Amino acid sequence: METHNITIVGGSGIVGREFLKILDEQNVPVGKVRILATQRSAGTEIFFRDQKIIVEETNPEKFNENDEVVFLTATSDVSQQIAPIAKKHGSFVIDDSSAYRMDPQVPLVIPEVNASDLEWHQGIVSQPNCTTTPLVLALAPVHKENPLQHIVVSTYQALAGAGGAALKGLRSETKAALEGESKPSGVQPREIAFNAIPQIDIFAENNSTKEELKMLNETRKILSSPDIAINATCVRIPTFFGHALSIWAKFTHPIEPNKAREQIQSMSGISVQDDVKNEIYPTPLDAAGIDDVLVGRIRQGNSNNELMLWAVTDSIRKGAATNVLQIIQEASKRGLIRRR
Ligand SMILES: NC(=O)c1ccc[n+]([C@@H]2O[C@H](COP(=O)([O-])OP(=O)(O)OC[C@H]3O[C@@H](n4cnc5c(N)ncnc54)[C@H](OP(=O)(O)O)[C@@H]3O)[C@@H](O)[C@H]2O)c1
């Protein structure tokens, strides 16, 4: 990849920090790295390689044509405010919030699945919700040969998916609960320690949550398949890292689980761990800190058009930071990032 200046808005959060860690792990060449956040963390020092980066407060005047890549990983409101400004300066903007995901002018990209959509970007690229990515990555290789008709998915989502404050809330609630006390931290709609909450994001008019609708709408957009039916139930569980998904999928034609296993295994970004005779399957702890989506429990459903599987992923890696880095690398390779 060419060397680019990268500006990270929300870089003091857990996704931003993981992004810096991955740049380092993969020895990615980068130019100037800037980190912006709120006034709360302005002035804080973040170390990246041999650089000490001082966090700056975010405001529209902070952006200019030297920002070749702008990674927005703060809130949807911040994305809506900053993305048009950075775009105007000619920056390649990647948004990690839900602000632009369903905008028809904005590609929504998982590089292993639809990298070619980057070609029509107009300055802003969006990346999917952290549960959409593992769902689509696991099913896309089968769908390519045997189109999906219907998906029913239930998720088991870790607190990391709700940001750094949610991790602290889980820690404090768990400590209190182990001492026999109930001290809801307010980071979730209910106390989360030793609980399971069937609400992620707010409720929409059809009584699904917005998280559940993201899985429906984003999957259809990424796969360019507006007719796939998707019923999702998204649940927060008291784990720190690693989201899990229980997936039922119905395809147009009969499906053979061994063939599906091979197709899924051949997908870049997926690792299949599926040997039930030896009790081998992945758990959220196995996915924490790694880039691959892990898939197991691949088996036939009740009819021969149905497949059932289990997938786990680290929401802040492939669900966020890893996917963003892959988007930058792919766009750079295709010459889609303007040089200063
Ligand atoms: N966590 C995940 O698994 C995941 C996955 C996919 C997408 N995302 C998306 O990524 C974004 C960040 O998530 P996160 O988990 O890293 O959250 P986080 O740990 O809570 O960090 C939020 C970051 O945004 C900054 N911020 C908040 N409000 C801001 C404002 N008004 N102006 C400028 N900066 C602001 C915070 O700055 P301070 O340090 O100053 O507070 C911090 O740097 C969210 O849009 C989230 O939906 C997260």
Image (tube, rainbow, N blue to C red):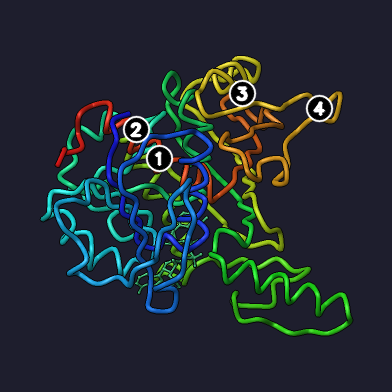
Q: Earlier in the sequence, mark 1 or mark 3?
A: 3
Please name the residue that numbered disc 4 is placed on: 276
* Label 3, ligand 1: CB separation under 8 Å: no
* Tags 1 and 3 touching, CB below 8 Å: no
Q: Is residue 239 above or below residue 49?
A: below
Picture quadrant of residue 197: bottom right
Please name the residue that numbered disc 1 is placed on: 325
Q: Identify residue type, mark 1.
A: Leu
**Label 2 vs label 3: CA separation?**
40 Å
Please name the residue that numbered disc 3 is placed on: 304
Q: Identify residue type, mark 2.
A: Gln
Which marked residue is nearer to the observer: mark 1 or mark 3?
Answer: 1
Q: At 65% from the left edge and 81% from the top edge, which residue is drawn?
A: 185
In this orientation, which residue lies closer to the viewer: 252 or 139?
A: 139
Q: At 60% from the left edge and 41% from the top edge, which residue is drawn?
A: 247
Q: Identify residue type, mark 3.
A: Asn
* Tags 2 and 3 touching, CB below 8 Å: no
Ligand 1 in which quarter: bottom left
State the count of labels.
Answer: 4
Please name the residue that numbered disc 2 is placed on: 329
Q: At 43% from the left edge and 44% from the top edge, which residue is drawn?
A: 229
| Quarter placement of the N terminus | top left
Q: Residues within 10 Å of mark 4 (few under 14, many from 20)?
A: few
* Tags 1 and 2 touching, CB below 8 Å: yes
